[in-house]
Image (cartoon, rainbow, N blue to C red):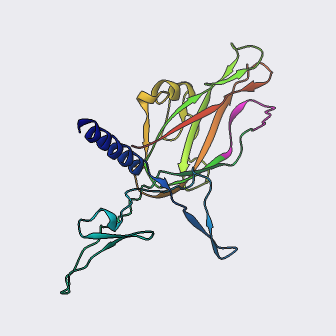
Amino acid sequence: MKKVILLSMLALLIVSAIGFAGTHAPIYSWNASSTAWVEVTNTTIAAATGTGTWSTGGLSTSVQVPGIGYFMVLPASPTWFKLPRVTWHLKISQWIYISLQYLDYYIHVDMPGDYTIDSFSLHVKTNGGVFTYFRTGGYFTDENDPNNTIPTWLGYKVDTATGPAVGLPTTGTNNSFWYDMTWINSNVGSPAQQLTVYPGGYWEHTFQGWIGFRVGVEQAKGNYSTFLDIYIQSDP
């Protein structure tokens, strides 16, 4: 008898585990061009499962009809009987759309002076908050001699591409718009120094980034370069 009970319990646990795991339930996306619902097969876009099947066979009032199945016997007098609730649970992941106008810029300067180049455009839209931090190549550095550098700054505007209203600050410092590239590495250059870019909900903005640099009369000729790495993470 104990063995029968144990086997029955084991069978119940197996059935429960199967029910909890769920089975694939097709999910569809509306295709406007073909005006039809099309099944989504890429699970990184959308997916669905169904769990907890039920039938009248488990009721004490059900009667088995051989070869057909179990039927529930309703009371002779009209009585409302509630079927199990059907519930839909929906989890929306955070998504983000990003576009960068250019990835490489090629500049040449023939005379000393302070310069900037038209902004690069970073367009972002997402349905949640975003954390960010930055790593840069520091000052423009001679690709053949790391001791030759050019003071370099980065500035940005939001939703406007108009040029900066202020000139470059004293070498090694910041002002109301320009941030020294080495300062960026030291102050917002790690996960521990992350910045919050909008706290949450849907938002869409275009960030215009400007790079400024100072070429002195004593600057050695050569090929110089620097870079900007942008790291992002969802706001949990």
Q: Position of residue 182 (x, y in %)?
A: 55, 24
Task: Examine the structure image and report whether residue 46 is included in the region drawn in magenta.
Answer: no
Q: Position of residue 86 (x, y in %)?
A: 35, 67
| Residue nearest the observer in this picture, 200 or 209 | 200
Does residue 82 appear left or right of residue 55 in this picture? left
Residue 37 is situated, as x and y percent measured from the top left of the image, at: 61, 71
Residue 166 visible in the displayed image: no
Instruction: Answer left or right for 144 relative to 150.
Output: right
Farthest residue, direction bottom: 77
Q: Quadrant of residue 106?
A: top right
**At x 37% / y 57%, what residue is drawn?**
52
Q: Is residue 107 magenta?
A: yes
What span is colored magenta in the figure? Answer: 105-119
Which image quadrant: the N terminus? top left
Q: Name the one closer to the observer, 159 or 47.
A: 47
Task: Determine whether 42 is above or below 114 in the image.
Answer: below
In-front residue for pair 136/233: 233
Picture residue at 58% right of the left edge, 39% below the top: 167
Left or right for 215, reference 195: right
Q: Residue at left 57%, top 56%?
A: 160
Residue 14, quarter of picture? top left
The relative height of residue 208 versus residue 80 in the rendered view (above or below) is: above
